[in-house]
C-alpha cells in the first residue's frame, strides 16, 4: 500500500428530507482518505449510512455538503460530459444484491460488454467478444456462460458477473457495497478471495462496505467504524481488533462468534449505550495513538489516553 491518496472524503454530508420538517442525516460530516492500492473497510450496523457514503462518493447521490476528491479532482464539481465519462470509467461499483443488479433481459455477454460499448474499448465485435471471454475467465467462469441469462446462475456466480462488469472498463477504484451479504457463507470466502487476487493482479483500490467485522478484517488494510452517519473510530485493521477504543466498536467486536466452545461459553456481549457519552461539548475526531482515531470529547480523550497507558503498563 502506497501513501498516495487516491480518494479524499472531506466533511461529507448526505441529508434526506422526509416530509416538510424532518431531515434524516444519513451521512453527517465524514472525513477520511483512501490510499492507492489499499482496501478501506467501512463497517457498522444496518442504517448507519455506510452504503449511502459509497453511493455519494461515486455520485449516485449528489451530496448535501462536503467534498470528495479523486486523484485531487473534486468529484461533485465534474460537470463536463467527457470528464464525467472519464470519471465513471475510473471508479466502479459492485452492488449488494447480485439478483437485482443484473438486467434479467440481457445476456451475460451484453451485461459485461455494456461498459466496453459506452467507453469504446473494443474496435470490433470480435475484440468485444474476446474481452468478455477474458473477463469471464478472470472471475472464475468460462466463455460458454456468455450466452446465458442471469437467472441461470447461482448467487455466487452472479456476484462474479457483477465483478466482471465492474472490471470491464479497467477502473482504478472499486466500491464494493456489501458484496457478500446476500451470499451463502460457503460462497462468501470465495468471492472475497477472488477480490483479493484481482487487487493484487490489477493494482486495484477498494472501499469495502460491510457489517460483518470478521470478513472486513480479513480483506481490509484499514477500517472505519460508522454509527448513525458519523465515523466513530478509524485504525489499521489489526490495531482496531487488538485495541478497540470506542464503546460502539467494542460492542461490535464482542458480537463476533468464534469456533471455540470455551470462548463462546464465557463470551460477554457488550451492549452499546450512547447515553453514557460526555455531553459537555461536541465530540471531535482525535488521534489517540499514531493512525488510530476516535470520535470523542476532550474529557473522553483524556480517559481513553489514560486507559491506553494503563493497558501498556500492565
Image (cartoon, helix red, strand yellow):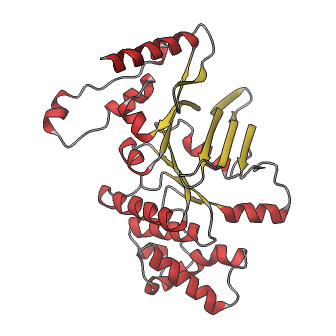
What residue is shown at x 62% (from left), y 38% (from top)?
32
Point out the image quarter for the C terminus.
top left
What residue is shown at x 70% (from left), y 62% (from top)?
88
The image position of residue 59, as x and y in percent, is 71, 51
Could you say which quadrant of the image residue 299 lies in? top right
Instruction: Evaluate whether residue 179 shows in this view.
Output: yes
In the displayed structure, 84 sits above or below 178; it is: below
Instruction: Evaluate whether residue 103 shows in this view.
Output: no
In the displayed structure, 238 sits above or below 98; it is: above
In the displayed structure, 71 sits above or below 42; it is: below
| Most distant residue in the left direction | 262
| Most distant residue in the front direction | 313
Determine whether, in the image, residue 168 is placed left or right of residue 195: right
The image position of residue 165, as x and y in percent, is 56, 70
The image position of residue 239, as x and y in percent, is 41, 35
| Most distant residue in the right direction | 80
What residue is shown at x 33% (from left), y 24% (from top)?
270
| Marker count (numbered) | 0
Determine whether, in the image, residue 59 is placed left or right of residue 110: right
Determine whether, in the image, residue 22 is placed left or right of residue 226: right
Q: Which of 280 and 4 is in front in this view?
A: 4
The image position of residue 197, as x and y in percent, is 43, 65
Q: Nearer the viewer, residue 22 or 286?
A: 286
Could you say which quadrant of the image residue 64 lies in? top right
Determine whether, in the image, residue 260 is placed left or right of residue 128: left
Amino acid at each position: 500500500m502506497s501513501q498516495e491518496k487516491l480518494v479524499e472524503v472531506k466533511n461529507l454530508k448526505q441529508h434526506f428530507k422526509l416530509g416538510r420538517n424532518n431531515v434524516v442525516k444519513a451521512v453527517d460530516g465524514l472525513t477520511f482518505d483512501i490510499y492507492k492500492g489499499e482496501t478501506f473497510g467501512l463497517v457498522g450496523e444496518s442504517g448507519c449510512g455506510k452504503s449511502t457514503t459509497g453511493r455519494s462518493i461515486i455520485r449516485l447521490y449528489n451530496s448535501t455538503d462536503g467534498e470528495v476528491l479523486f486523484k485531487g479532482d473534486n468529484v461533485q464539481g465534474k460537470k463536463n460530459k467527457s470528464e464525467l465519462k472519464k470519471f465513471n470509467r475510473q471508479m466502479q461499483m459492485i452492488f449488494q444484491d447480485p439478483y437485482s443488479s443484473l438486467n434479467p433481459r440481457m445476456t451475460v455477454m451484453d451485461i459485461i460488454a455494456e461498459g466496453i460499448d459506452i467507453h469504446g474499448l473494443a474496435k470490433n465485435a470480435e475484440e468485444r467478444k474476446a474481452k468478455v471471454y477474458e473477463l469471464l475467465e478472470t472471475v472464475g467462469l468460462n466463455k460458454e456462460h456468455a450466452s446465458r441469462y442471469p437467472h441461470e446462475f447461482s448467487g455466487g456466480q452472479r456476484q462474479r458477473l457483477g465483478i466482471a462488469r465492474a472490471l470491464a472498463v479497467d477502473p482504478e477504484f472499486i466500491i464494493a457495497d456489501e458484496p457478500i451479504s446476500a451470499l451463502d457463507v460457503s460462497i462468501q470466502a470465495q468471492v472475497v478471495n477472488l477480490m483479493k487476487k484481482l487487487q493484487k493482479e490489477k493494482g486495484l483500490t477498494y472501499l469495502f462496505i460491510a457489517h460483518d467485522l470478521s470478513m472486513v478484517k480479513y480483506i481490509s488494510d484499514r477500517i472505519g467504524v460508522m454509527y448513525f452517519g458519523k465515523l466513530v473510530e478509524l485504525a489499521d485493521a489489526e490495531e482496531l481488533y487488538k485495541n478497540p477504543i470506542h464503546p460502539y466498536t467494542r460492542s461490535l467486536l464482542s458480537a463476533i462468534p468464534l469456533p471455540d466452545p470455551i470462548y463462546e461459553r464465557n463470551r460477554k456481549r457488550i451492549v452499546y449505550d450512547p447515553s453514557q457519552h460526555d455531553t459537555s461539548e461536541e465530540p471531535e475526531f482525535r488521534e489517540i495513538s499514531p493512525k488510530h482515531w476516535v470520535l470523542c470529547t476532550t474529557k473522553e480523550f483524556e480517559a481513553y489516553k489514560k486507559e491506553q497507558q494503563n493497558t501498556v503498563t500492565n
